[in-house]
Amino acid sequence: MQKWHSNRLEHQEYSLNGLVDRITLVQNIFAKAELVHDDGDDQKERAYLDDIIQMYAWQTNDTLAIAQ
């Protein structure tokens, strides 16, 4: 039981670190989108936002739900 708890905690740390990394990546991409938005570059802004959406839309149904 103690070994199971130890492994579980290690996996939580890995998961939390992965989540922090993912949030940081999304924040960086979003910051880039805001910068090009301020410059009036709609095409680049759309591309950055699409990158974020594609990180979370794994299936057609996901993309449809996001669009709705």
Image (cartoon, grey):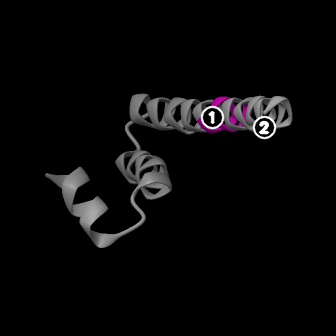
Task: Estimate how packed mark 1 is, as few (under 14), some (14 to 19) or many (20 or more) residues with alpha carbons within 10 Å.
Answer: few
Image coords of residue 24 (percent x, y): 64, 30
Image coords of residue 58 (percent x, y): 42, 65
Image coords of residue 11 (percent x, y): 75, 38
Three-letter amino acid code of the residue under disc 2:
Trp
Query: Mark 2 — residue?
Result: 4
- Region in magenta: 17-22
Relative to 44, is 23 on the left or the right?
Answer: right
Image coords of residue 29 (percent x, y): 56, 39
Examine the structure image and report whether residue 34 is included in the region drawn in magenta. Answer: no
The answer to which quarter of the image holds residue 67 is: bottom left
Query: Mark 1 — residue?
Result: 19
Three-letter amino acid code of the residue under disc 1:
Leu
Q: Is residue 63 above or below residue 8?
A: below
2 vs 1, front mark: 2
Residue located 30% across and 60% down the image = 62
Mark nearer the N terminus (2 vs 1): 2
Relative to 19, is 58 on the left or the right?
Answer: left
Task: Estimate how packed mark 2 is, as few (under 14), some (14 to 19) or many (20 or more) residues with alpha carbons within 10 Å.
Answer: few
Q: Secondary structure at mark 2?
A: helix
Which residue of the protein is positioned furthest toward the left in this rendering? 68
Report the predominant secondary structure element of the magenta stretch.
Answer: helix
Residue located 58% across and 32% down the image = 23
Please tell me which residue lies in front, 48 or 64: 64
Please tell me which residue lies in front, 9 or 14: 9
Please tell me which residue lies in front, 10 or 52: 10
